[in-house]
Amino acid sequence: MKNFILLLSFTFILSSHAQQEDFNEINFTKADQMAQRYKGESLYNLPLLTHRLTAHLDTDAERFRVIYYWVCHNISGAYDMMAMNNRKRHKFKNDPKNLQQWNTRFKKEVFTTLRRDKKTLCTGYAYLIQVMSTYAGLESVIINGYDTTLRSKEMELPNHSWNAIKLNGKWYLCDATWSSGYTDMSTYLFEFEYDNRYFLMAPADFIKTHTPVIKKWTLLDPVVD
């Protein structure tokens, strides 16, 4: 009996932390094909783009999948902006006034570049995922925190942003920045290379590289809304 109870407890832990596996019964092919159908579309009318992507899909999971897949295949990383932001944030780390002024100016530049050129850094990816999810009737939040693969001197301030999305009453983690591709450091050009691991990744794996500022967004414990 004791072993049976332990087995039940272990099964519950696995199921409560499972992520992509929660949707094994859903075939995302239709969602992915819909994203490919609208490849290259402009960002100047996000409500219309979101409607076109999601209107013919049946479940919230598919509607989020098409948004995520589209963003990851159409928005490229801007290494130059990331490097400049890191330099400025390091320079002003002990100067709150100038840091705030820089953050305000840079935020405007990020969103202008995102809409015009479809290039951005993590802030823009997370913003776009959240806004398009909202237009699709889904609840998403932007999570600020640390990319823990970087050296400690680069982690004095939060240095990364990603998303949580609520599907079927449960929160899930994703990182469109890391799913979309990488910067070729020999040319500093962005290369699209979709990585599906960061789509609804299990919290126990996500925490290995992502530490949120607000602890509840580790999702290692249930989030109480």
Image: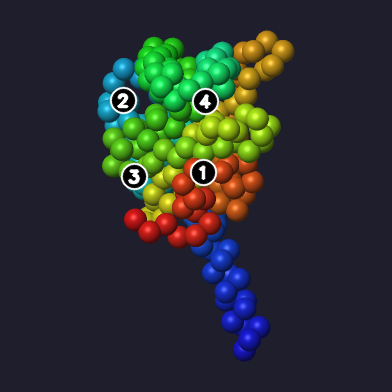
In what element is the residue under mark 1? strand
In what element is the residue under mark 4? loop
Determine whether 9 is above or below 191 in the image: below
User: For the point 48% across and 17% down, which residue is it?
Assistant: 119
User: For the point 31% across and 38% down, which residue is it?
Assistant: 134
Determine whether 40 is above or below 125 in the image: above
Q: Which residue is mark 4?
A: 94
Q: Which residue is mark 3?
A: 139
Classify mark 2: residues with Cα within 10 Å, few (<14), some (14-19) or many (20+): some
Mark closer to the observer (3, 1) = 1
Left or right: 9 as drawn, with respect to 49: right
In whole angstroms, how far apart are the C-alphas of marks 3 and 2?
Answer: 16 Å
In whole angstroms, how far apart are the C-alphas of marks 2 and 1?
Answer: 28 Å
Mark closer to the observer (4, 2) = 4
Mark closer to the observer (3, 4) = 4
The kind of residue on which mark 1 rests is Pro
Q: Position of residue 82 (x, y in %)?
A: 55, 19
